[in-house]
Amino acid sequence: MFLRIVFICILLLSNIRVKSQDLFNLENSTQFADFLKRTRQFEHAAREYERIAFLDVQNNDIRLSLIQVYFLSADYAEALKKASKIYQFNQNLPRLFAMEYSRLMLLNDSIAQLNSFVTNNPNLQIEDNRKIIMYSYMLNENWQQAEKILKQMPEEYSEHSLVIKQALNQKYKSPLLATGMSAIIPGAGKIYTRDWKDGLFSFLAVGSLAFQSYRGFSKYGTQAGSGWIYGGIGTVFYAGNIYGTHKAAKRYNSKLKESVKAKTRHLLITGF
């Protein structure tokens, strides 16, 4: 019985070796890499595509797949690095490659390099150029110019229109006004920047300390230690409130800008 099992195992292993002689050819390797890509095993897929690209240096489809794997794994810096190494900033890239390269430059904020590439690549169509330029304006927060380009685009860019309109209609807070409000009424500037809790706390804290200081001086005169202590602490709180209000206004504006920038990047990743 034992010998029979050993014999069967030998036959199975021999059969596997015979069939595996063709396992690592380019066609099977490509199918395996594609499978890894489809099943989102991007790290393994990248290694497989790297090996195939090394063996088949003329296969542009494999090169594109390699870059797309890094893109799908959200490693945009590495994707651009690979693309730059493969294409060596070739101005005559085919359209499909040129569009992918442009997207990677946009995601990595390589705008200056991108403008030169778009201008000199003969394979990009007019709508391609407009799309790329529109995205560069959006990422640079040049919303008026982005809107001008958008008006020349098809209706399918309605989502982009919503993002641009949101950016143009944003109501930013003035750091100078917020600071002035808190200087007059502690906490008012923070309430202006919609930081209600912190604004109310600042008002109560500074107000309470000021009252305690006033009470001490009223009761014991200028020699009152409590008056000076409460007054000193209140002054620190008052100054900190003014400084914090200026930062709060900037933080509020930054959140608004980051919101539309995140939406722009999402469109760039999913709808380019």
Image: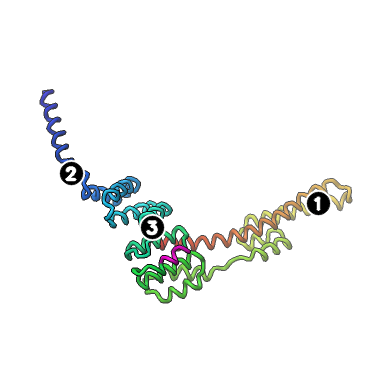
- The residue beneath circle 1 is 213
State the residue in front, 272 or 128.
128
Give the spatial CA distance, label 2 vs label 3: 34 Å
Look at the image and give the residue range highlighted in magenta.
112-117
State the residue in front, 3 or 30.
30
The scheme the figure's colours follow is rainbow
Quick check: 79 left or right of 219? left
State the residue in front, 28 or 186.
28
Q: Amino acid at mark 2?
A: Asp
Mark linked to residue 200: none
Q: Quadrant of the C terminus?
A: bottom left
Quarter where residue 199 is shown: bottom right
Quarter where residue 239 is shown: bottom right
Of marks 1 and 3, the one in the foreground: 3
Of marks 2 and 3, the one in the foreground: 3
**Secondary structure mainly formed by the magenta segment:** helix
Q: Position of residue 220 (x, y in %)?
A: 88, 49
Crowding near pointer 2: few (<14 within 10 Å), some, many (20+)? few
Q: Position of residue 29 (x, y in %)?
A: 24, 47
Q: Which one is earlier in the sequence, the residue at label 2 or at label 1?
A: 2
Quick check: 12 left or right of 234? left
Q: Amino acid at mark 1?
A: Ser
Q: Residue at x 22, y 44 (%)?
A: 24
Q: Amino acid at mark 3?
A: Gln
Q: What SS does tag 3 mark? A: loop
Q: Residue at x 79, y 50 (%)?
A: 232
Q: Which one is earlier in the sequence, the residue at label 2 or at label 3?
A: 2
Crowding near pointer 3: few (<14 within 10 Å), some, many (20+)? few
- Residue 125 seen in render: yes
- The residue beneath circle 3 is 88
- The residue beneath circle 2 is 22
